[in-house]
Image (cartoon, rainbow, N blue to C red):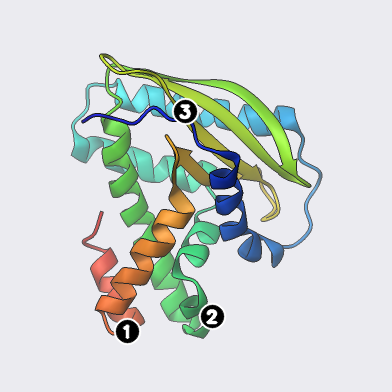
Amino acid sequence: MAIDTHSPSRRTVLAGLMAGSAALAIAGPAAALDTAQARSLVNSVVDEINSVINSGGTLNQMIPQFEHLFNQYADVNIIAQSSMGVAYRSATPAQRQAYIEAFKGYLARKYGKRFREFIGGKIAVTGASEIKSGIYQVTSTAKLRGQSPFELDWLVSNKSGRNLFFNLIIDGVNMLATERTEIGGLLDRNGGNVDKLIATLKRAG
């Protein structure tokens, strides 16, 4: 699959930042995060991704590993809440919990398939900077066989109490913005019914 090699613009990065800011704003205070810690977190993520994609495993073997990776390093609750938008606020506590669990599996399947395209390649962290108070952008480069290198940008915060990434921009494609569109579309196709959305997500990805 051909991949566009244009780097993500600052506007794209800031769009992702805005998409997650509302959810992050309701989280409690946390100890200060710094550039070195943000870069260290993404180095750990990248090391694990490189290990999984080059392990020789099948997709079905990789998916549980990617789900563990997202659960350990990503702020999945914030990503899930932001993706569902205003409908999340009107859902019952039981629906919210079921939705987040279904979303975890969906996220692992969807992005596990995308990362599997990187087999034979390698991702390397190239830089980190604070782009807003307490929010850091960590840049990395994916080098794949037979393709030009392209960037992956990770947005990192600890406003949920842990150092976690809450957005990922793969070659300019913004995960938070994409998932808000995807989940919103699924919710619309299910007539706004949260239980039907949850059932759909369990099969999606």
Q: Quadrant of the N terminus?
A: top left
**Is tag 3's residue or tag 2's residue first in the polypeptide sequence?**
2
56 or 18, nearer to the observer: 18
Answer with the quarter of the image where residue 139 lies.
Answer: top right
Amino acid at circle 1? Asn
Identify the residue at image location x=26%, y=30%.
Answer: 117
Q: Between marks 3 and 1, how big is the CA–CA gap?
A: 37 Å
Query: How many marks can you see?
Result: 3
Residue 134 is left or right of residue 127, and the answer is: right
Compared with 157, 137 (above or below) is above
Q: Position of residue 16 (x, y in %)?
A: 55, 51
Q: Position of residue 87 (x, y in %)?
A: 46, 79
Say which residue appears at 34% left-offset and 62% top-offset: 182
Q: Is residue 122 above or below residue 14?
A: above
Q: Secondary structure at mark 1?
A: loop
In this rendering, position of residue 69 left or right of residue 14: left
Residue 89's label in the rendered image is: 2
Q: Judge the density around disc 3: few (<14), some (14-19), many (≥20) Cα neighbours within 10 Å.
A: many
**Real-space Cα separation, disc 1 to disc 2, in angstroms:** 14 Å
Q: Residues within 10 Å of mark 1 (few under 14, many from 20)?
A: some
Q: Secondary structure at mark 2?
A: helix
Q: Amino acid at mark 3?
A: Glu
Describe the element under mark 3 as helix, strand or loop.
Answer: strand
| Mark 2 neighbour class, 10 Å CA radius: few under 14, some 14 to 19, many 20 or more | few
Residue indicated by mark 3: 151
Q: Quadrant of residue 145?
A: top left
CA separation, marks 3 and 2? 34 Å
Regarding residue 38, the answer to whether it shows in the image is: yes
Instruction: Check disc 1 and report the residue beneath it.
Output: 193
Q: Residue at x 26, y 53 (%)?
A: 205
Q: Position of residue 81 (x, y in %)?
A: 51, 66
- The quarter holding residue 154 reads top right
